[in-house]
Image (cartoon, helix red, strand yellow):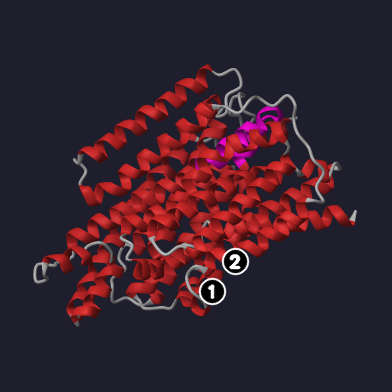
């Protein structure tokens, strides 16, 4: 009895690490950019390397555990995650940090699905298992708002590599706890398709490479065009291969069910927007407004407040109006907040940001909570595993695309709006890389006007990002509201969409 609950506690710690590693780096990006001379594109790769690898390998990692032993592969995942963290802690250049984040993504992809899959052997009774799954899932979610605060505190007291080193003792505890877990495997699990995994990683990686490099090299650059073409070819090959597979790794037929598709796309879009916001906002708070790293982390908390509110009140609203209506309203609120935020200028204080950030978080919570619940609820028992894996993969891909696309939009607008005509060519090129670089150039030249110009250019770039987010959220909100059923929960995958609440009332 005690042994398995201790094991659960350690798994919760592991998932907490996975959760805050999705956001802990964001508050450190301005510091790393200053100390490692990282451009905006390099900062995007630092954030995206973890998410891309994590998303692409999550489904094959689950199959590896099913075939070769879940405890064994969970231990391997924790070991890989620790190795990547150690590499990041001692890195002294941007390519090494990016490589470390990619290695951590491999470990995270093994940890996330396998930490959940070992729970049935630990808790065979349904009631206890439900509590255990809830605890592990809550730990992963709770880690996201903790990331910026923990990262800020570490950066206030230690060097930036401490955000990586923090993972090591927690992972060691997790590895020790894995010795308490029984080994389990599924002899009937399909073989791991290395070609499918390679197509997924290659397709996502090349597309995101093109998006990140386009603002620097130009959209017509042959390398950028080649990356887009190759990415589309690889992802098309992936879809065609999966459609022919008897037991596909990505069950794309699930997307034919509107009850699953609309919530899944909503969750993916909201994740895309929030990932982009978590990339842009720390730079605004830390570089433009001048807060320290801990102060930046604390001031990002309103971004997560909507999750707490939504978790408490969406249940009754969903039962009364249906999940699609609540999701639609959440997306419209998110859109309004983003439009409001797009008016923020470089001279506006944190109070202005806090207002629209709080409203944005409410829209986020009211969109994501019913979306996740409705997507899972639309799956029948036989396809629950495949559908949950596809949903998690779509959300991670959304996060990677959000950082890539919105970060590139920010970089393009910033570089175009920054007037560097009075600067020497080397200084001008350096200042156009990022607002952090511009501040360093201004400090070296003693040019206060460059600081003001860079802050204004960054504010205009952030405004463009927020307008793009607002338009996306508004279009999605109207689409979900118009296409979704009027009430009740969606039926299982493969079943027609019906008003189950009304059906139950008639029985």
Residue 113: where, in percent of width, then height? Answer: 65, 43
Residue 210: where, in percent of width, then height? Answer: 31, 42
SS type, badge 1: helix
Residue 459: where, in percent of width, then height? Answer: 28, 66
Residue 184: where, in percent of width, then height? Answer: 78, 37
Identify the residue at image location x=32%, y=55%. 41
User: Position of 430 compared to 366: left or right?
Assistant: left
Give the CA distance from mark 2 to mark 1: 9 Å
Q: Is any atom of residue 138 visible in this view? A: yes
Q: Quadrant of residue 413?
A: bottom left
The verdict on residue 158 being magenta is no
- Residue at which label 2 appears: 166
Identify the residue at image location x=35%, y=30%. 232
Q: Which of marks 2 and 1 is nearer the N terminus?
A: 1
Q: Residues within 10 Å of mark 1 (few under 14, many from 20)?
A: some
The verdict on residue 383 being magenta is yes
Point out the stretch of residues depicted in magenta: 374-395
Identify the residue at image location x=20%, y=46%. 218
- The answer to whether marks 2 and 1 mark residues whose Cβ atoms lie closer than 8 Å is yes
Closer to us: 462 or 480: 462
User: Position of 443 compared to 197: left or right?
Assistant: left
The disc placed on residue 154 is 1
């Amino acid at each position: 009895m005690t042994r398995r609950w201790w094991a659960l506690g350690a798994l919760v710690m592991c998932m907490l690490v996975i959760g805050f590693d999705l956001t802990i780096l964001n508050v450190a990006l301005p510091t790393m950019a200053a100390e490692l001379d990282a451009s905006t594109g390099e900062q995007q790769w630092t954030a995206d390397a973890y998410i891309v690898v994590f998303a692409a390998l999550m489904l094959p990692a689950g199959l590896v555990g099913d075939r070769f032993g879940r405890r064994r592969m969970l231990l391997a995942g924790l070991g890989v995650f620790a190795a990547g963290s150690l590499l990041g802690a001692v890195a002294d250049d941007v390519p090494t940090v990016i490589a470390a984040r990619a290695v951590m993504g491999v470990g995270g992809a093994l940890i996330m699905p396998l930490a959940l899959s070992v729970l049935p052997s630990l808790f065979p009774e349904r009631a206890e298992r439900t509590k255990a799954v809830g605890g592990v899932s809550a730990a992963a979610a709770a880690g996201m708002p903790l990331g910026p605060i923990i990262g800020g505190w570490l950066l206030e007291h230690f060097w930036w590599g401490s955000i990586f080193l923090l993972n090591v003792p927690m992972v060691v505890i997790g590895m020790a706890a894995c010795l308490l877990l029984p080994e389990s495997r599924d002899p009937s699990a399909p073989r791991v398709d290395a070609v499918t995994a390679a197509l997924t990683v290659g397709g996502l990686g090349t597309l995101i490479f093109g998006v990140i490099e386009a603002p620097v090299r130009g959209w017509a650059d042959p390398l950028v065009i080649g990356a887009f073409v190759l990415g589309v070819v690889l992802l098309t090959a992936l879809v065609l291969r999966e459609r022919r597979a008897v037991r596909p790794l990505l069950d794309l037929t699930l997307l034919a069910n509107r009850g699953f598709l609309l919530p899944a796309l909503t969750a993916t879009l909201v994740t895309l927007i929030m990932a982009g916001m978590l990339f842009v906002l720390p730079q605004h708070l830390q570089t433009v407004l001048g807060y320290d790293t801990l102060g930046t982390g604390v001031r990002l908390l309103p971004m997560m407040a909507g999750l707490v509110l939504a978790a408490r009140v969406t249940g009754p609203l969903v039962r009364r109006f249906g999940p699609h209506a609540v999701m639609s309203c959440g997306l419209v609120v998110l859109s309004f907040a983003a439009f409001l935020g797009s008016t923020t200028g470089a001279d506006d204080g944190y109070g202005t940001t806090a207002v629209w950030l709080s409203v944005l978080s409410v829209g986020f919570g009211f969109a994501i909570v019913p979306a996740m619940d409705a997507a899972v609820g639309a799956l029948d028992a036989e396809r629950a595993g495949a559908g949950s894996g596809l949903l998690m993969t779509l959300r991670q891909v959304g996060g990677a695309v959000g950082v890539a696309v919105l970060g590139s939009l920010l970089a393009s607008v910033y570089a175009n709006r920054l007037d560097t005509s009075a600067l020497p060519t080397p200084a001008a090129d350096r200042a156009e890389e990022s607002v952090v670089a511009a501040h360093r150039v201004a400090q070296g030249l003693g040019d206060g006007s460059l600081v003001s110009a860079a802050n204004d250019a960054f504010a205009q770039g952030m405004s463009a990002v927020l307008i793009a987010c607002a338009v996306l959220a508004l279009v999605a909100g109207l689409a979900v509201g118009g296409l979704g059923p009027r009430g009740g929960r969606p039926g299982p995958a493969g079943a027609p969409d019906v008003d189950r609440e009304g059906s139950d009332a008639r029985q």
